[in-house]
């Protein structure tokens, strides 16, 4: 059974944490989870799928030699100090892989997955969490 990880962001430091298997929690729903960072209540990030701004965020998956490439945006997302993609993740069956990015990098990542049937995630430091499905 595929897990449904959830992500929280700290309003103070903007750090992100992943709850790998919220279904294990005794809380009645994932919304009842509470996570804090240095005394700040962290905010659960909702999975966005529809672009609303001129910057494009939905991760796109394509087959490449030896695996898949995930690119953020049909037009490449900015990768400046003040606005960039912090990480790209892929969930493929029982595997979850993350590639961290920094300003100046290309908004893309390679993963050694055999096919493109994956759930792709990306986290923008300004516009938060986006998924491809
Ligand atoms: Fe953004």
Image (cartoon, rainbow, N blue to C red):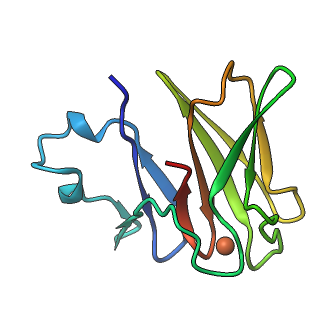
**Residue 97 placement (x, y as % from top left):** 61, 33
Reply above or below: 35 against 70: below
Assign ligand 1 to one image quadrant.
bottom right
Q: How many marks?
A: 0
Reply above or below: 116 against 87: above
In the picture, which quadrant includes the N terminus? top left
Question: Residue at the location (46% across, 76% down)?
Answer: 11
**Residue 13 placement (x, y as % from top left):** 54, 72
Q: Is residue 119 left or right of residue 107?
A: left
Question: Residue at the location (12% across, 40% down)?
Answer: 26
Most foreground residue, 42 or 50: 50
**Residue 43 placement (x, y as % from top left):** 37, 68
Question: Residue at the location (77% across, 67% down)?
Answer: 77
Q: Is residue 108 left or right of residue 12?
A: right
Question: Residue at the location (76% across, 53% down)?
Answer: 101
**Residue 40 placement (x, y as % from top left):** 36, 73
Most foreground residue, 8 or 69: 69
Residue 38 occupies which quadrant of the picture?
Answer: bottom left
Most foreground residue, 94 or 58: 58
């Amino acid at each position: 059974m595929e897990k449904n990880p959830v992500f929280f962001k700290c309003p103070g430091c903007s750090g992100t944490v992943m709850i790998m298997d919220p279904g294990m929690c005794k809380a009645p729903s994932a919304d009842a989870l509470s996570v804090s960072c240095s005394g700040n209540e962290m905010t659960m990030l909702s999975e966005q799928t529809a672009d609303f701004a001129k910057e494009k965020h939905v991760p796109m998956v394509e087959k490449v030699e030896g695996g898949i490439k995930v690119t953020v945006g049909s037009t490449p997302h900015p990768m400046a100090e003040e606005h960039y993609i912090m990480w790209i993740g892929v969930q493929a069956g029982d595997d979850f892989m993350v590639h961290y990015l920094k300003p100046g990098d290309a908004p893309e990542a390679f993963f050694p997955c055999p096919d493109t049937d994956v759930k792709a995630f990306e986290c923008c430091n300004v516009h938060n969490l986006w998924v491809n499905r």
